[in-house]
Amino acid sequence: MNNFSAALNAYIEQVREWGQREVRRAGLEADRNGAPLPPDHPYFAAYVDFRRRHPVPADDGAMPEGPAVRMAAINEENAYWDRGMGVAAPGPGLPAPIVTAAGTPEQRERFLGPFRGTDIPRWGSFALTEPSGGSDTAAFRTRATRTDRGYLLNGAKCFIGNAARADWVLVQANLDPDKGRAGSGRFSSSVATAA
């Protein structure tokens, strides 16, 4: 038994029922096909509907657990049913906390706004890992160079979950290699393009 609040336990139970009924089945289908489910698969529309009816609890005081504890507990339950389907789930994904914490109000609205209240599956993606440097930001070779039209990104990324179906991608690049990690920056594109 856990020591979570009654409110968090009730939400985890909703996630458990969804996982048993839908997530496990979708994950097994993807495994049988040997490929991810396509973006237009009915599972993703059902997922968006489930999340609309059962939003992740906000910081409204109903749950004493902080947001990190809530998300860890919820993600643990999701992972039990099928970790791959959790990674493939529609939503802003890994870039959301970065944009929330470091973005301007305009950037938060531009990149996160389309995910609020939508009835259609939408994905975000985060291009962090590089073929030669992994996720060590000090070793990144992807460079961002300022131009009169914004920034020019030049480099290679790999292992970008949901990139093929993403509405936008947050790219981690190096502005100043001499500064190591302090020279790192993040750049968003509202349209993902394949290389």
Image (cartoon, helix red, strand yellow):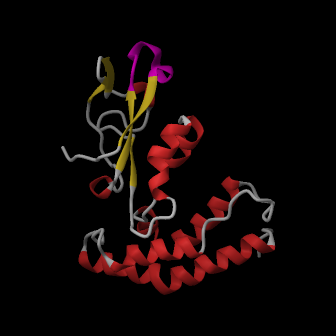
In the rendered structure, the answer to whether residue 193 lies left or right of residue 42 reads: left
> Chief secondary structure of the magenta span?
helix
Tell me where the magenta segment starts and ends, as one range. 174-183
Extreme residue in the top direction: 178
Residue 179 visible somewhere in the drawing: yes
Residue 100 against residue 64 in the figure, above or below = above
In the rendered structure, the answer to whether residue 176 lies left or right of residue 104 reads: left
The number of numbered badges drawn on the structure is: 0
Across and down, in percent, residue 170 comes to 40, 41
Across and down, in percent, residue 146 comes to 33, 18
Residue drawn at x 33%, y 54% is 166
Across and down, in percent, residue 47 comes to 46, 74
Extreme residue in the bottom direction: 21
In the rendered structure, the answer to whether residue 156 lies left or right of residue 67 reads: left
Residue drawn at x 37%, y 28% is 140
Locate residue 127: give its quadrant.
Answer: top left
